[in-house]
Image (spheres, helix red, strand yellow):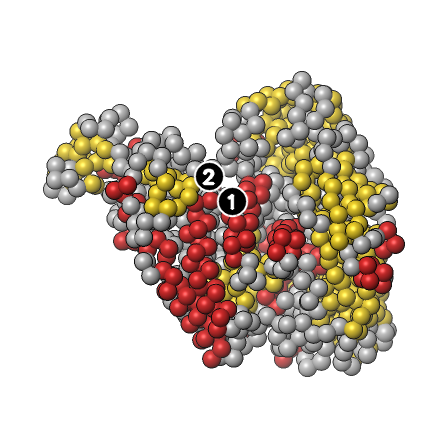
Amino acid sequence: MAFAADLGSQRVNWNKAAWAVQRLPAPLSWERGSRLRIGIRTAQPRRDVGVVVAVQRQGQCWYAQSWACSLAQPVCSNEITLADLLPAEWFAPQGESHVDGVGIMDGQGITAIAVGVCNPLGIGCVSFTLTDLQLLPPPAPAATAQVRVFSQALRVEDTNAVSPGVFGSFNLPAGHVARYRLGSSRRIEHTGLRADYAPPQEGEAFVLHTLGDRVRPSPRLTHPDWRQQSAAAGRDLAQQAQEHGQHVVLEYWNEPYLNWANRNRANYIPHLYDLDAAQEGAIAHIAHDGEPVPHLRWSKTYTKPAWNWCSPRDWRRGRDAHGKLHSPVHAPPYKGMDAVYGGAWKPSQHPPEDCPDGATYTIQGDKGELALTAVTPWHLYDDSQFTHWSGSAMVPLYVQPALACAQACKDVDPLATVIIGWGNRPSEDHWAAWELLYRPTIDALIHVADGVCDHDYGGAPDKMAAVYELVDCYAMTRHGKHLSGWNSECAAATDPQAVPQAAEHDTGGADRRKCRWAMHKVIHLLAMVPDKARNCAHFGYGGSWWSDSGEGVAFDCMRALRGRMLLSQSDDDGILTVATVDGTDPRCPRPDDLGPGQDLVVAVLNRSSLPRQVQVHADAPEGCQLISGQHLACHEQNDGRMQLVVSGVAVEPHKATYAMSLEAGEVQLLRFPLQGRFAGRTGIQRRQYYAAEILTAVDAQQAYVSSVQLPITQAGKAVAARLRLAVEHLAHGAGEAWIGQQRIALPGRPDGENAARLLDVAIDPQWLSAETELRIQLSDPQCPGFRVVCASILLDSEEDLEPERQV
């Protein structure tokens, strides 16, 4: 099968893909664990793009693996596991579906095979030939994974209990906080200039207060006294919280990445800038104070912006004999915002495309036909914007009022929590959101910021942990300060505000998919980054959003997963676990139906792509005995709704053992009511030390090379150590790490687009030194390349555990 495509010379949205598709005459069914051997020949070797392999299931959903094979050599080959293929979300061949209600490539009913590339960077012509595609039998089944839960407490950096906000919500009906034991909610004040504090509901730990909404222009543009008004909002919010005995949790602005710069153009309203100074290509200046806005330019040339929000016809307007501009607004206002944006959007009054400027055309006016003269008004564009979300020009319009607001808030209450960010994922568009928006915002606001926000809609449920690692790594290595991760909207579905096609997409098998996605996301965060994951605001109600028979069942299952953390571990890379003692965190009072005592709760996640057998060995927490046990799992019913199924577990006073069978991506829990009270004054302290290098491509010509500075006293008393990597497109067998002279084979982390993943590898503490050299490279030049997002070393030591500051 031959592939050739021209991907252009200009950067565009991340899902720019081209494919060669082979439809099969009859469906094939392959064993789920089967592997595919891929052979590629190219006359144009290159390091900047890899081959994507996709298969279509049942004539509907496409599943794909990015960088399934390299193009760095004239002849390349690789093996991939069929079950590792993920839904090709928004880049499927020929715009076809990525949803089938299953969400797992089970090998049944394969109707087409495709090879291609997905790359938005303007890389030009790509060509290759698929020379080999062989089906290989699956390997022998993996051994039963062993999970061990210890009696000792665990503290990760400054965190000894799971954050209640991970079980948070936004826009759920009244009563859901108590029903599902939700730990937080979210409230948006739309103007960004008015304090509107709301105390937590009974059972909540905090309310996330968001100042400013996406459809409103920045106050930097609309108010000459923006600094004073922004400061007053932050100050008043902190004071109102203190009057309720609380420390406010403040998020500055909701999704400025989106409507500030998309087709609504909320920050591009021409009259907010000095129109008298407009010249072709000139930098725009704010109308009320004359300050320039770097990267924001004037133009009347439709082809000038790299990304255009309208058609050529809608770029122009008509002027009547009295000089009045008809349909004067610059872009379609968000619903109900006509007065703010400058008028109504009436595209029927725009000049026909074949009517040149200066020529006359007629429209149907209120009093009959009206003659208008075609004109092109001044438009604003950001010379760094290449897709529908904000570019560099928007950064000062966010940072300046955010700084005034946050500093005033902190002046009143230094223990207030301030969250900054843009509302998309920093990893968006191959980390373009990081480079254009998040990194400069962190640099400008680091002294007032405590965390960084994100909105996580759809895609792989485990992608945000690696993003939180990158944010914290950068903050620590550049600024010496931790920044935590605060999700303020999440759901299994894609946000149709960002991707309009999502509103039209089939959501078959929705309850099962939503239940699994929510549980996978939460447990992965708690198992990997409990010190960084502070909030997950599960969004909405009805339709594609929260359903009580989907996410509601997931939250019922996890209802007792609260409180102090215990040390737990798995001997298998594909199995993650988290263990807590409910009833030990005053932020999470136990509801009456759970009883007044404490519970040991164990969650187990199968993050591998195949079903797994797991044996759980749980010790009673220090000072406690097990009274009884329950196994909790979420099962799909005949009508598609999910149901919580609870069964008994035999226990001994000081231990319990239980065997689980988990599907790929499934979470199951164990709950053990306890006799006694868990103190947890001593236990395991886990500390993390970062390498400074970030976002490094690894291929046959380049390795990741850095070092980690370690306090030699900590390394000397460590009882366990791990190398942690955040990686993208790491194929099985493709990577190796060297710590000094010690080689480590890296497990694979196949992923989708914009979905970095974490991996931990146990290492011998004896390998470590005060300056530990780290090198990560391909294990063979034939292997496909990958990216190291960031790297660190984790050290565990036995210590006295002081209490954390609780948010």
Callout 2: 10 Å neighbours few (<14), some, many (20+)?
A: some
Q: Residue furthest right?
A: 766
The residue beneath circle 1 is 436
- Amino acid at the residue labelled 1: Leu
Callout 1: 10 Å neighbours few (<14), some, many (20+)?
A: some
Contact, CB < 8 Å: mark 2 with mark 1?
A: yes
* Residue depicted at x 48% and y 65%: 407
- Amino acid at the residue labelled 2: Ser
Q: CA distance from mark 2 to mark 1?
A: 8 Å
Residue 123 to residue 424: above or below: above
* Residue depicted at x 65% and y 56%: 476
Can residue 353 be seen in the rendering of this structure?
yes
* Residue depicted at x 68% and y 26%: 71
Q: Does 7 sit left or right of 792 as displayed?
A: left
Relative depth, front residue between 521 and 795: 795
Q: Does 154 sit left or right of 195 as displayed?
A: right
Relative depth, front residue between 494 and 108: 494
Residue 743 to residue 157: above or below: above
Image quarter (top left, top right, bottom left or bottom right) of the N terminus:
top right
Residue 746's spot in the image, x, y percent?
A: 79, 43
* Residue depicted at x 29% and y 39%: 278
Q: Residue furthest top?
A: 43
The residue beneath circle 2 is 384
- Of helix, strand and loop, which one carries label 2? loop
Q: Dividing the picture into quarters, in which one does residue 88 lie?
A: top right
Residue 410's spot in the image, x, y percent?
A: 50, 69
Residue 123's spot in the image, x, y percent?
A: 57, 27
Relative depth, front residue between 197 and 623: 197
